[in-house]
Amino acid sequence: MEVRTSTIDGVLVFVPTPHRDDRGLFTRTFDTAVGLAHGVDLGPEAQDSQSRSRLGTVRGMHGRRGRGEAKLVRVAHGAVLDVLVDARPGSATFGEVATFHLDDQDFHHLYVPPGLLHGFQALTEVADVCYRIDRPHAPGEDLAVAHDDPDLAIRWPLPVTAISERDRTAGAWRELVARPDA
């Protein structure tokens, strides 16, 4: 499994090697030893989740207050444009946006360190996204920034066909940056 760095400090892309034959394929979805060798320890409280989205759906931009959360993101079926925003005050890449194409062909996994906002858009009729998060969900720590915030200027490749009410009414990047508890 190869590990690549990103333009945002601390973000890693895990690149597995799928083994394909006439039956289909086999690939390792994560290797703890490889993760630990690159500083990725999701800990004993890791929680796995999965979402399913229709073509054009946008989920995000989400994060957590306090110590944040680390996560490993992959696509089990379909394809997404995955988007990260560095929301860590004092980070050399604070405010930077990075995008990644994740799909069920290459099986790349994205390691998202604590303090980043995360979102994605489904690029296929159905996209199943799997998350491994380093701690249980704490709804009181959730935060969100509008997917179409002009200061972030995220370029979603497709028209947005579906978005949750929470995401539709999410706050602005400037408001998040101004909050001392974010």
Image (cartoon, rainbow, N blue to C red):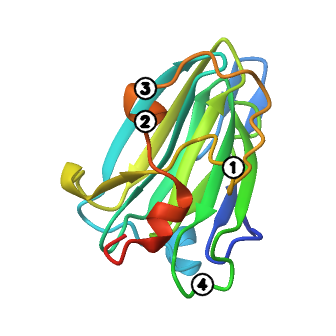
Disc 2 marks which residue? 169
State whether residue 143 is above or below residue 103. below
Q: For the residues marked 2 and 4, what is the alpha-carbon distance in whole angstroms? A: 27 Å
Q: For the residues marked 3 and 1, what is the alpha-carbon distance in whole angstroms? A: 19 Å
**Between disc 1 and disc 4, whose residue precedes?**
4
Q: For the residues marked 2 and 1, what is the alpha-carbon distance in whole angstroms? A: 14 Å
- Residue 164: give its label: 3
Q: For the residues marked 2 and 3, what is the alpha-carbon distance in whole angstroms? A: 9 Å
Q: Label 2's element? A: loop
Which amino acid, mark 4?
Answer: Ser
In which quadrant will I find the N terminus? bottom right
Which amino acid, mark 2?
Answer: Thr
Which amino acid, mark 1?
Answer: Pro
Q: Label 1's element? A: loop
**Between disc 3 and disc 1, whose residue precedes?**
1
State whether residue 94 is above or below residue 25. below
At a point 61% along the width and 61% down the height, the residue shown is 85
Quarter residue 107 falls in: top right
Disc 4 marks which residue? 91
Q: Which of 103/120 is in front?
A: 120
Q: Are marks 2 and 3 in contact (CB under 8 Å)?
A: no
Disc 1 marks which residue? 150
Which amino acid, mark 3?
Answer: Ser
Q: For the residues marked 1 and 4, what is the alpha-carbon distance in whole angstroms? A: 21 Å
Query: Where residue 47 sits in the image (x, y, percent)?
Result: 30, 50
